[in-house]
Structures are given as structure tokens and as C-alpha cells.
């Protein structure tokens, strides 16, 4: 058995053990299993149909008074037994411990999502569209570190601030293992929920020497706004990355506007438009647009299992294949995703 196979087997065993413990533990134990699988079908441009899976995750979360924690493994991640610089083995998505040292304040230590990106910090099984969009490569992603979070602060504010290893899983960096223990990433977020139905947030992050030792720091600014009233949800988000992969002057900006409307318990209509602009250090700026139009179906289910079907058409606009940015569809596409999850 190779090292990669051993890591997969170990990860699967841990996930199964957590699931069994959660299913048969006492109420006092505070264990709660989680897991979901997302099966996909994609058709891009004039090409054929590609069948696959976006996520196949399992794990459990634990809470006991002021303490808690969680472990989430992804068995569909590429090179699961390998390790990205600065992070844990790729199969491990999240592993963390929490301490609520004050009714409004919490300390989290482990590997988890950094507090930057409104849509990125939405769990994968709750996404409004079938894929994470054009802003995803610009966030700092998951990273080992420590973060302090405050909620319910005066005026409806909340805050998150953390220090992490180099952001090796970000699409905007190319860190090396030599940077571990030498360079770091930092992120902070301020959000506001002072008015019913309205949420606003702004975040800033940086990962030092984003292209390897001696290169420029990657810097990213994000702002998001969400309004929810009855069956209607409106969202907008803007993200701006500078000195991508440590290259001085390589910048990219992405903005999207989103609307969805819950027609009934079973049907939701979804529309989202992305606009991206890439500015390479060598010049030759380019633009890309991706418009998602779709429907989400929520079949009636009993018990702890939830089923969801998403169908999206993606319309490409702008410079297409000539776009030099990190994310986005360079051609029209049809995306279908079936998701099975535990409540």
C-alpha cells in the first residue's frame, strides 16, 4: 500500500469511527455526525458530458459546554495523501477545537476556513449555485492557525481575527515547504447585522511571500452584502487580489450580483452574474463574465437525509479563452448536481 493509499484508509477509518460514535453516543456526549456527497454532470461548449463528483465528505462535530471541535474529511480531493505547503494532509478539510472563554467570544485552533469571503464561508452543501464561483481562487482558503471571534457585540457587530500558516491552498499563492515556520498569513473580518434581514461584512487578508521566499506578499480585500426577506435573497460581493502568486503588479478583481427566490418548499429560482478583470504585471488586461441561471429542486424527504438537485446554465461573456485570471468558465456550460446530505 502506498503512502497515499494509507492516508486514504486512515482517513476513512477515522471518519467511520466518528460517525459510529456519533450515532451511538449519549445525548450528553454532544457528538453530531455530518456528511454529504455531490455527484455532478458537466457539459462545456461543444464538448461531451463529464460525470464526476465535487465533494464526498464525512466527519463529526462535538460540543460540551464551553468547548467543542470538529473533523471533516474529503475523500474526493486530488492527491488525498499528499500535503500542500503550510497545511495538513489534503484529505483533511477541517480539524479544530473551540473554547468559548466569554459568552460573546470564542477561540478556535486547528485547520479551518480563514475569515475572508462571504460566499466562500458558506458551507459547500448550502451553496446557491452548483460550483464555487470566480472569487474562489482569490480567497486564502483553509489554513492551520488560531482565530478569535466575537459575536453579538454592541451595535450588531461581529469580528474575526486570525494568524495562520502560509495560505498554501489558495489559488492566488504558490508557497513552498521552506516557508513553513518562516512566513505567515493573516486575516480579519468585520461584519454587521444591526438591521433585520440585512448582513454586511468586510475582510482583509495577506499571505507573506506568496510566490516563494523573497517574493511579494499577496493581499486581498473582500466586501459582501446580503438581504433576505421572506422567499427573496439578494447578495453582492466584491473581492480584489493584489500581487497574485508573489508577482508584483499581478492583480485581479471579481464582483457578483445574486438573486434567488423560493417559489415553494420544493423549488427555488437562482440567478447570478460574475464580472472578473485580470491585470497581469506585463499588461494586456482582460475581462470575463459568467452568468448562472438555474433552478434548485428540494424533493420531500423523511428522516435525517436531505436530497437536493441543482441545474444551472452558465453563459460566458467577455474575452473567453484569452482571459488571464484564475477562475471562471471560458465557455458556456450546463451543470447538474445531485446532493445527498445528513441534516
Image: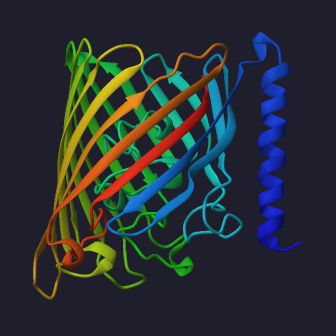
User: Which of the 4 quarters of the picture holds residue 317?
Assistant: bottom left
- Tell me what residue is drawn at x 20 percent, y 79 percent: 322
- Res. 72 in view: no
Above or below, comparing residue 22 to residue 95 in the picture = above
Point out residue 60 in the picture as x, y percentages from the top left corner.
Answer: 69, 33
Above or below, comparing residue 221 to residue 20 in the picture = below
Above or below, comparing residue 210 to residue 12 in the picture = below
Residue at the right extreme of this rendering: 1
Q: Nearer the viewer, residue 167 or 35?
A: 35
Q: Nearer the viewer, residue 230 or 227?
A: 230
User: Which of the 4 quarters of the picture holds residue 211?
Assistant: bottom left
The quadrant of the picture occupied by the C terminus is top right
The quadrant of the picture occupied by the N terminus is bottom right
- Tell me what residue is drawn at x 63 percent, y 56 percent: 76
Above or below, comparing residue 335 to residue 108 in the picture = below
Point out residue 105 in the picture as x, y percentages from the top left corner.
Answer: 44, 25
Point out residue 309 in the picture as x, y percentages from the top left corner.
Answer: 47, 34
- Res. 79 in view: yes
Is 89 on the left-hand or right-hand side of 146?
right
Is 301 on the left-hand or right-hand side of 337?
right
Amino acid at each position: 500500500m502506498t503512502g497515499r493509499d494509507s492516508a486514504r484508509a486512515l482517513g476513512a477509518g477515522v471518519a467511520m469511527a466518528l460517525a459510529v460514535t456519533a450515532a451511538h453516543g449519549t445525548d450528553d456526549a454532544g457528538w453530531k455526525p455530518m456528511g454529504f456527497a455531490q455527484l455532478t454532470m458537466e457539459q462545456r461548449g461543444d464538448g461531451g458530458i463529464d460525470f464526476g463528483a465535487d465533494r464526498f465528505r464525512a466527519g463529526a462535530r462535538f460540543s460540551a459546554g464551553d468547548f467543542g471541535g470538529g473533523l471533516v474529511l474529503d475523500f474526493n480531493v486530488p492527491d488525498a495523501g499528499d500535503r500542500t505547503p503550510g497545511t495538513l494532509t489534503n484529505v483533511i478539510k477541517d480539524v479544530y477545537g473551540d473554547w468559548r472563554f466569554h459568552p460573546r467570544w470564542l477561540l478556535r485552533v486547528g485547520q479551518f476556513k480563514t475569515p475572508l469571503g462571504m460566499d466562500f464561508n458558506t458551507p459547500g452543501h448550502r451553496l446557491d449555485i452548483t460550483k464555487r464561483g470566480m472569487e474562489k481562487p482569490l480567497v486564502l482558503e483553509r489554513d492551520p492557525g488560531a482565530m478569535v471571534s466575537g459575536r453579538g457585540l454592541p451595535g450588531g457587530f461581529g469580528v474575526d481575527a486570525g494568524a495562520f500558516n502560509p495560505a498554501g491552498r489558495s489559488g492566488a499563492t504558490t508557497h513552498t515547504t521552506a516557508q513553513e515556520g518562516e512566513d505567515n498569513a493573516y486575516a480579519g473580518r468585520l461584519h454587521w447585522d444591526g438591521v433585520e434581514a440585512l448582513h454586511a461584512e468586510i475582510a482583509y487578508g495577506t499571505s507573506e511571500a506568496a510566490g516563494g521566499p523573497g517574493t511579494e506578499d499577496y493581499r486581498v480585500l473582500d466586501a459582501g452584502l446580503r438581504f433576505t426577506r421572506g422567499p427573496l435573497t439578494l447578495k453582492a460581493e466584491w473581492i480584489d487580489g493584489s500581487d497574485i502568486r508573489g508577482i508584483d503588479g499581478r492583480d485581479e478583481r471579481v464582483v457578483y450580483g445574486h438573486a434567488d427566490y423560493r417559489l415553494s418548499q420544493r423549488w427555488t429560482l437562482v440567478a447570478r452574474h460574475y464580472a472578473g478583470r485580470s491585470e497581469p504585471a506585463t499588461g494586456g488586461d482582460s475581462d470575463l463574465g459568467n452568468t448562472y441561471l438555474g433552478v434548485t429542486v428540494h424533493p420531500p424527504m423523511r428522516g435525517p437525509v436531505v436530497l437536493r438537485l441543482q441545474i444551472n446554465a452558465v453563459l460566458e461573456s467577455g474575452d473567453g479563452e484569452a482571459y488571464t485570471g484564475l477562475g471562471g468558465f471560458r465557455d458556456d456550460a450546463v451543470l447538474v448536481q445531485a446532493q445527498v446530505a445528513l441534516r
